[in-house]
Every structure is written in structure tokens, then in C-alpha cells.
Image (cartoon, helix red, strand yellow):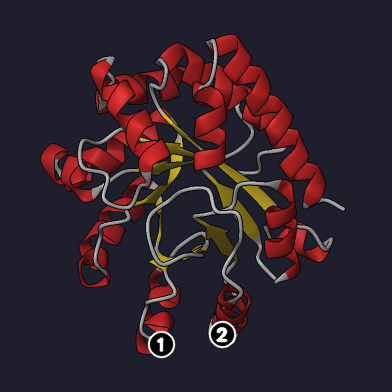
């Protein structure tokens, strides 16, 4: 992200849901994204109560779970696929699966599969410390989120504790495609720049190339795009979905590389 910033560009971080429509397609999608402009890839582990996700990603998680996708099968797929990828993999999961497996075991397992980062949207700031310690032992970076509703007093603490980059949620609400970005995002990026030199990634709501470019011009170090990728991958046959994914990834990368 720092190298891209020096060139006046920003990173592209696509998100897809593991197991939708199946894990074989997920592995193919990871390779396609990696070859067509993804600088990092966020891989969602399907979960039955995805509180931060809008209807597109919720539906993808439901389909993946119905197909029998579970954490172990996701990690097995990732372990087989990650050696072929250049882009680092950041897993996205809720806290309950981590707790269920055991915190230290969870981090050991995802590191062995090839993940290097983790986003846990329902992890409170006050609970981060023990999680971060276990993650550090396994070489995993915990990426924390801030939102338009985050109290100003918490910005600095979250920015201090996040690793890798700071994830700025661009909307008040869940994930999903929006036709217009909130102008306050630019103000939030400026505020965060005043308290941290860590890279800032902006996600939730970005659905087209012009919005990605807008976020870059506002000063973001990365644009994170989820629902728009998940929707394309789910439409038509797996081959059609993968082709749509490739075309969309290229268009986003071109928009933030000018």
C-alpha cells in the first residue's frame, strides 16, 4: 500500500464468499482476482448470523452453508490454493467460530492455510488485546474497523491497535452496493490521517469503478469491494461468473491506477 501511495495509486481489495457457489469456483476466483489486479484478497468464511453483511453477502453465505461449506473445508481449499497466489489473503469471519475452535488453534490453522490477515467485524475494541497476542504468535495481522458512528475519542485507540491497515466503513449500516458514497468519508479519511500513518482502506458500499476512483482521490490507500464481486460471481454459470469477476476486477484496477 505504501509503494502504491508513492505512485499516486491505491490498492484494490476484492471480497468473495468462500463456497459460493462451491469451493472449486472459489479457488478459481482467487486465482483470477490475483492475476487481474487484486493487491490483497478478502475471503469471507460463511456464517449463519452475519450481522455486518447486507442481503447479497448474506445470501451468498446461506448458499455456501447449504452446500456444506465449513471452516475446515475453506482452510483446506485455501491451503491448496495460496501457494499459487501473490496477493496476501485476509480472512473475514465473525468471533464465534474463533471462540468455538479455540483462539490459539484458530490462528495456527489459518496461518497454516496461508492467510496473513483477519477481519472480525463483531470483535469489540475492548476484547482485541488477547486476540491480537494469539494472532501475533501465528504471524496474523488483525485489521480493525472504524465507522462514521465511531466516537472521535476511539479513533486514535483503534488506529493504534489495528495491524496491516485501518478499515474505514464508508456507510452507517451493513455491506451492500450503493449508488452514491457518503461525502463524509473524505472528512473521515482526513481526520484519520491526522492521528495515524497506517494505510487506510475504505469499504462497504463501493460498487463501481467511478466510486473506487473517488475514494482514491479522497486519499484512501485501498478500496475494498465486496457485494459487487459476490453478485457477479453468483450470476449465471460458474464460468460466466468467473468471467464477469475478471472483467470487473480489471475495470476497478484501471480506475485506481490512472
Q: Is residue 28 visible?
A: yes
Which residue is farthest front?
179
Residue 135 falls left or right of residue 164: left
Percent x, y for residue 7? 84, 60
Label at residue 152: 1
Q: Residue at x 43, y 51 (%)?
A: 175
Q: What residue is rendered at 72% in x and 63% in y?
A: 214
Q: Secondary structure at mark 1?
A: helix
User: Relative to 236, does residue 85 appear above or below in the rendering?
Assistant: below
At which x and y percent is residue 196? 55, 80
Residue, disc 2: 191
**Tag 1: Cα neighbours inside 10 Å, few (<14), some, or many (≥20)?**
few
Depicted 240 relative to depicted 140: above or below: above
Q: Residue at x 42, y 81 (%)?
A: 155
Can residue 41 be seen here?
Answer: no
Instruction: Tell which of 93 and 52 is nearer to you.
Output: 52
Amino acid at each position: 500500500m505504501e509503494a502504491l501511495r508513492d505512485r499516486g495509486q491505491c490498492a484494490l481489495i476484492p471480497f468473495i464468499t468462500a463456497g459460493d457457489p462451491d469451493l472449486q469456483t472459489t479457488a478459481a476466483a482467487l486465482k483470477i482476482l490475483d492475476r487481474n489486479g487484486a493487491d490483497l484478497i478478502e475471503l469471507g468464511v460463511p456464517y449463519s448470523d452475519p450481522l455486518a453483511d447486507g442481503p447479497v453477502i448474506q445470501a451468498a453465505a446461506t448458499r455456501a452453508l447449504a452446500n456444506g461449506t465449513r471452516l475446515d473445508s475453506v482452510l483446506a481449499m485455501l491451503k491448496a490454493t495460496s501457494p499459487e497466489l501473490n496477493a496476501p489473503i485476509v480472512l473475514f469471519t465473525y468471533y464465534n467460530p474463533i471462540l468455538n475452535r479455540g483462539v490459539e488453534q484458530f490462528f495456527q490453522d489459518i496461518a497454516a492455510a496461508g492467510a496473513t490477515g483477519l477481519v472480525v467485524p463483531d470483535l469489540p475494541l475492548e476484547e482485541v488485546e488477547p486476540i491480537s497476542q494469539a494472532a501475533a504468535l501465528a504471524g496474523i495481522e488483525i485489521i480493525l474497523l472504524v465507522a462514521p458512528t465511531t466516537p472521535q475519542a476511539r479513533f486514535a485507540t483503534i488506529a493504534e491497535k489495528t495491524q496491516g491497515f485501518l478499515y474505514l466503513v464508508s456507510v452507517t449500516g451493513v455491506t451492500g452496493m450503493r449508488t452514491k458514497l457518503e461525502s463524509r468519508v473524505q472528512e473521515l479519511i482526513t481526520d484519520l490521517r491526522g492521528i495515524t500513518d497506517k494505510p487506510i482502506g475504505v469499504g462497504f458500499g463501493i460498487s463501481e469503478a467511478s466510486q473506487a476512483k473517488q475514494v482514491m482521490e479522497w486519499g484512501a490507500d485501498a478500496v475494498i469491494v465486496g457485494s459487487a464481486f459476490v453478485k457477479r460471481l453468483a450470476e449465471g454459470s460458474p464460468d460466466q461468473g468467473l468471467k464477469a469477476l475478471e472483467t470487473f476486477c480489471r475495470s476497478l484496477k484501471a480506475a485506481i491506477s490512472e
